[in-house]
Every structure is written in structure tokens, then in C-alpha cells.
Image (cartoon, rainbow, N blue to C red):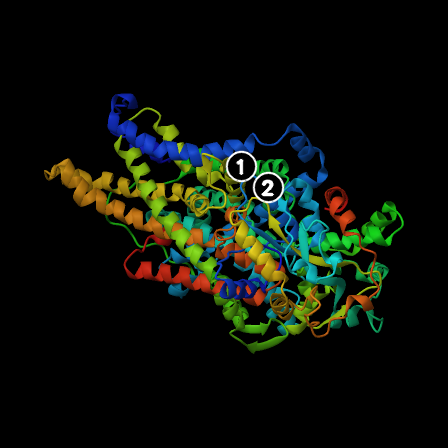
Amino acid sequence: MSGVGYEISRILSQFQRETGIRTEFIRLSAGEMAARIVAGARNPRGDIFLGGPSETHEAIIPEGVLSPYQSPRADETDPSFHHPEYYWSGFYVGPMGFAINTSRWRAAMGDDPYPETWEDLLDERLRGEVIMASPAASGTAYNIVATQFFRHGTEEEAWDYLARLNENVPFYTSSGAAPARHAGTGESIIGIAFAHDVMKPMDAGFPLALSIPKQSGWEIGAVSIINNGPNPAAAEAFVDWMLGPEAQQLHTDLSLRISTHPAVQMPPGATPLSQLDLVDYNYQWAGENRGRIVEEWNERFD
Amino acid sequence: MPTRSIERDGGRRPSQLLSPFKDPTTITAIIIVVVPILIIVLYPAASVILRPAAADWNTFFTRPRYLGVLRNSLTISALSTVSATTIGFCFAYALSRPNFPGKFFFRITSILPLVSPPFVAGLALILLLGRRGIITHSILGLDISMYGWHGLWLAQTFAYYPIAAMTLSGVLKSLNPTLEYAAQDLGQSRWGIFRTVVLPMSVPGIASAALLVLMLSLSDFGNPMVIGGPFRVMAVEAYMQVVGMQNLGMGAVVSVMLLLPSLAFFLLQRYYVGRRQYTSVTGKGGRLDPMPIPPAAKWILFAVLTAISLFVVAIFVVIVWGAFARTWGFDWSLTFRNFEFTLLARLGHIWNSVRFSLMAGIGTAIFSVIAAYVLYRRQFTGKRAFDFLVVLPAALPGTLVGIAFIFAFNRPPLLLTGTATIIVLSMAVRNVPIGYRTALSGLHQIDKSIEESAADGGANTFQILKDITLPLLKTAFTVTLVYTFIRSMNTVSAVVFLVSAGTNVATTSILGLAEHGYWGEAAAMATILIAITSSVVILFRLIGGKRLFEL
């Protein structure tokens, strides 16, 4: 089981309290988890792939490692929040954001306004100061990369943007949430991460500002069932439980992510997606092209 | 002059080598030792080496990127080896002299880093010297980054100097003071004595310590992961290939390219340096006290070692402090929140670490004692090959062991991936050489003096076994158990490939937290881990096991 980090233990102990089903988990970045599930297809050790952008789930459907499951609760949410054949179901959404270290920004950029577009990250004064994760390991970082393809007219333009961004990135982390932490501690001026992953270090007291850029990407965080896992009945029970409003409220309270369930309240400080300038993110395309794009990204920048 | 190496020494009775096939006990004993090694060392190693396609090899050697990573690995381990060995020598030299002040303190700081996972040094450096470091930022007002080769160099230096200190302390203590006094009588200055006697006599020991540190820093995974930043090394590259991209072929190539230098250093150690230990030949008794250090040198060394020791203490203080601080660098108020997180969410990982390490310790101790006893007591052809096979795991980088186990044990009848067994095996296999050497040196002690006199006094073989051999092996058994336990509690490079839901251990858990920037939680978990291992060390010392860290 994977994906969501800090809050996972609280969620699983609540699940056990309510259903009596005991669980164990391992936390990995979404890309690592996907790779692991594919590699272990002959002998699956887990039942559930929890969390991570839906395109990471989507990308491994052709490998035959996920099992479709139409939960009775799946249709309580908007149909756009789950796979048409229920290979994965979304339980949270979140836009991509920039975590800005306020004190280092002031020192380096003076009174300039915080970056509001992807192009703002290319400023020469930000050389070595923008941290993001590696799309090979992280679902967050793949979402950032894929967003560039939806934002630009041609693939060449997207690669060109990524190459110029690469000039400002000192190194790529393997965890998608880590860049927000790096910005928080001042290791870099800017970290690119999902907004909820920026809000957590903000809450913890780090001097951060969150900016959601124009044409931002966004994710549907998904849960899916691993094919031929050891406990298929418990896996379905878990998905049913996770898609319910109580579990989602708990998850939202812990993680500050926006729930897909209409009955769940917005986390404090979050902006509804409908009020944001979002890119037209095509999850199916992102999933289907993940292998090719990550490979080329590695070739160019790793 | 060269001493006899172990295997020659073992055969020092009139050699009456038997074919093992004529002696059923011998053949059984050999099978008990050799078959497991074939299955858990040679077979996995072979599956990695044979795994990559020609195209993978081609990619490695034609893409400048990979050769750059290899160069990074070799460069940083060379740098760390020089600095760690130098510091280790200073500690060992100072502690071997009668008039060095503060020995009790320095004896502790000379080995202190061993009770924590090596990458804790990397984590502490970020908290001490990073952008929001307590020394660099809060005290000196600097704004520097620790991520990169410089931070990695510092972290490895502090993580590995105890290994050099331990190796060299034995060498420096066994130098015969007579030579130094003789040089003094011949008119050498104090510096001259150091230069013409102490240093040349220690060269093989220094080389041996340096090769050990070289192998450790070359295969270090935790520190580069925590503090390497843009500076990529082979162990991390192999991890990214296998875990991040599931490119098993490329992961195998990278881990084999990590194995080759490691194996070369190992062979160099075994067949060159190991044969050139100097001993001074004297009659028994009448041993002089070691020559004192002259005052000027003493105080310079004292200042240097004090600075290093204070920094090491700072590493531990900062980890404990970091565990209690609310938001490192910004909100210094104290909190139990990080420990609450550890106890709520990660207690199972700590318990797994304790459980698996204990099993690995017991298994390694039993196996090592049997292997040593077989080699020592039985005469058979192929003894040298047997000895080589048992110590070979010392040459294997943890990364290679981890990847090899994935390849070797992922299908029936050896389907072990995802189980606790595979983790315990990976912990045990790498400590067998140390356990085996400990047991052998215990047996050699018997041979040299006690056993002969017991025989002279009329004791029969059974009495010797009961009253002399077994008690000595008991010591080797306990030392190996405790040593393997501590090393396994702190290991990360192999297990990071092998953990799964239900079998995750504390080190990989801490590494994940640190990599995410959850320093408080990482520090809290590291504090608990350090508390467990140091209690075991202290307990062991209290019940009389003094030899633990003087191997």
C-alpha cells in the first residue's frame, strides 16, 4: 500500500477500528510504487495501491496488474473522478503549486511579486534555486512534466521549456513532496509540489508562500486494487470505506487535500479547483505516454 | 617480516591433508557450511552478473553520464578514505600512548558513530551546517548548502573514521616499544622516531584500514541519498534504476560496476596488505611501556582530537535536539510530537529492526563458529578455497546483495521476496566474515599456548574441548551476535531493496523521512534506534565483553 505519507497510519488504524481488518503498508513515491507493482506481478505482495496521481495508476493498466472494481460508493462522486471502467477511483484532487521561501525570495528578488506563471520560473536570478522531483520516481514530477505538454502547442516547445527550466534546477529529488520542504528550509527559493504538500510545511511553521500558477496542472489522487493480491475481499472493503465521506473527511483533515466527495468540507485555506486557471489535463494521454516521456526526460536531463 | 596468514597458520601441524571424501564427518561439516554459501552468496551474485543484456553494458560504457557517476563514486570514496583514515590514525595513536590526557572520553568518541546508522551523520550535517544549520546559520549567519560532494565527504569522514581507528588501534598497540627506545638510544629525535619507526611499522595497518574504509564509503547508500543532492554515486544510481524505473538490467550493470572495484580492494587487502603485517620478534616478558608522546605533539593532537570529538558529540546532540524541536531552524520550542508520530506510525518498523537483527545475529554467530571450527579442526584439500568462500561476502557492496537477492529469490522453490527471511539473510550474510574471523582468532589463541599446556598436563581431547575450546568459542559467539545485531540495526543499502509492507525496518523508514525533509520525525526515530543500539553496547560491556569494538 502506498502513496499518501504521513497520514497513512491514522487512516489505516481508523479503518481497522471500524472494520476489524488489520493492514500493513509501505510508503513509496508513486512512480516507484507503480514500478514495484509491475515487477511483482507474478507474486503480488500487496492488495491496494493508495494515492498518487491517477495517471500513475492509468499507466500500469496495460500491464494487467490492476483489477477493475466498481465500488457501490464510486458513483457518489462525479464520473470524471474515476476510470470509465473503474480501474481506479479518485478520492482527492489538488492543483500544482509553487512553494516560495519568503525570506530568501526577498533577499534574492527584492520586492518583485511572487511567480504566477510557469515562465516566471525561468528568471536568471533563480539559477540553482528551483527544486522539483524526478518524474521517473515521482508522480508529482511527472504531473509537472505532462502539464508542459498540455500547455504548449507542440512537443518540441514543451521539451524546450523543460530544458530551460532544467537550467534553474540544481537537483531532482525522488519524493514529490520533498521540494516544498527544501523550499521551507531555504535549501532553494522555490519548490514545485502539489498545493497540499506545500500547505503542510506552511502549517508546520516554515516561512513559505504558496502560489498556484496560471495554467497549473492538477491531479486526481486515486486508489486501485492490485490484481491477484492475497486478500481481494479485504481490498474491496477498503476501497468502499476509503470512498465514503467519513474516511475522506478524515483524510482531508489530515492531509489538507481536497476531497472528491461532495459531502466533505474544503480544507482551510484551499481554493476550489473551479476558481483556478487550470490546464486542460488529459489523464488518459498522460498515463498512456508516461513510459515514453519519462524515458526521454531521463535521456535529456538525468 | 610477514607473519603467517590464517590459512597457513591453520596448517602448521605436519600437514596430513585428507581427501574429504574419506571422512564422513568432515564432508558433512563442509556441506553444512559450503552449501548455504553457494545458495545465498554465489548463486545470487551470479544471477546479477549474468542478468544484463549486451545492450545494457554498451549503454553503460558509451554514455558519459554513467562513467561520470562511476568517477564520482571513486573520487568521493578516495577523499573520504584519506580523511577518515587520518583521523582514525590520530585516535589510535593517541590512545596507544600512556601520557595522553582524556583517554576515557576519546575512547568513547573514537567509536561513537558506530552506534548510529551511517547516514545519521548526513542528516546531522544538514541540521548543523546546512542552510538553516545551527552553527552556520544561527551562530555564524551564513547561508550555505550542504547538499553535494562536500557535505557527502564530511558525512562519510565522520561515519567511517571509527572503522579506521579500530583497525589501527590493534596495530599501534602491538608495536614493540623496544624499537622506539632503541631508535632513541641511537640518537633519533622524537619526530625521527615517529618517522622512521612508528610510521613505517604501521604502513600495512594503515593500508588495511584505508582499504576497509574505501570499501565502505564506495558502497555507502544512505549518506549520498540524504546529503548527496546533485552528486550522484553508483549505489544511488543502482537504486534509482531498480526501484525508480524498474530497469533491472541497468541496475545490474551498475551494481556489478560497483562490485568490481570493491572486489579489487578486497583482494588487495587479502593477498597483499594482509600478508605484510609487521611483527617484532622478541623473547617473552620484559615488555616496556609504550613511549610517551612529546608535549608539543601531545597538545596539538589533543586539540585536533578534541575538535573532532566535540563535533561528533554535536552530531548526536543535534539529532536528539532535532527530535524534540518543533520546526528546525524556525521554531525552537520543544515538543513530543515527533516521538508521538514515531510511536503511533513507525513502532512496527523499529520492532522489525530489532527482531530481524536479533535473528541475523544468532544465525551469523552459529554459522560463523561452525565454519571456523571446520576450517580449524579438519584437514582437507581445498581449505584455502573454503576460507576464501567464507570471507568473500565482505567484498560485496550492500547494493549488490540487495539487487542479487531480488533476482535470485523471486521464484519457486526459492520464493523469498517480500518475506522476513530474505531481510534476515541479507543482514546475516554480510557479517559472516567478521564472525568467522573472530571465531578463528579465538581458536588460534587456544592453539598457541593453552591447549599445548593442557595436553602436556595430561588433558584428553574431550576435556580440552569442554574446558578450553567451547568457552573461547562462546566468547566469539557472543561477540559475533552483538556485533551483527548492531550492524544489522543500522544497515540500509541492501534492505532498501528488500523491504515490503509488513517487513519495513527502521533505517529505511528514517531514510524516507529524511529524504522527504521530515527531519524532526527522522531525528526522533534515529534517537530511538541509537538508544537501543547503545544500550546493547553498554550492557555488553557491563557483562564483561570488552572486545566488541576492538575487532
Q: CA distance from mark 1 to mark 2?
A: 11 Å
Please tell me in which quadrant of the rendered image residue B111 appears. Answer: bottom left
Q: Residue A77 placed where, x, y %?
A: 71, 62
Which residue lies at the image location 88% right of the left edge and 47% below the top edge? A154
Residue furthest front in the image: A72
Residue furthest right in the image: A153
Quarter the N terminus of chain A occupies: bottom right
Which residue lies at the image location 75% right of the left edge and 69% below the top edge? A210
The relative height of residue B305 versus residue B379 in the rendered view (above or below) is below
Q: Residues within 10 Å of mark 2 (few under 14, many from 20)?
A: some
- Left or right placement of residue B412 versus residue A277 in this view: left
Q: Secondary structure at mark 2?
A: helix
Q: Residue B437 placed where, x, y %?
A: 35, 41
Q: Are marks 1 and 2 on the same chain?
A: no
Q: Residue B286 placed where, x, y %?
A: 24, 49
Q: State how many labels appear.
A: 2
**1 vs 2, front mark:** 2
Residue furthest bottom in the image: B333
Amino acid type assigned to the residue bearing label 2 in the image: Ala
Q: Which residue is mark 2?
A: A39
Which numbered tag is attached to residue A172?
A: none
- Left or right placement of residue B280 versus residue B167 in this view: left
Q: Nearer the viewer, residue B72 or A135?
A: A135
Please tell me in which quadrant of the rendered image residue B134 appears. Answer: bottom right
Amino acid type assigned to the residue bearing label 1 in the image: Phe
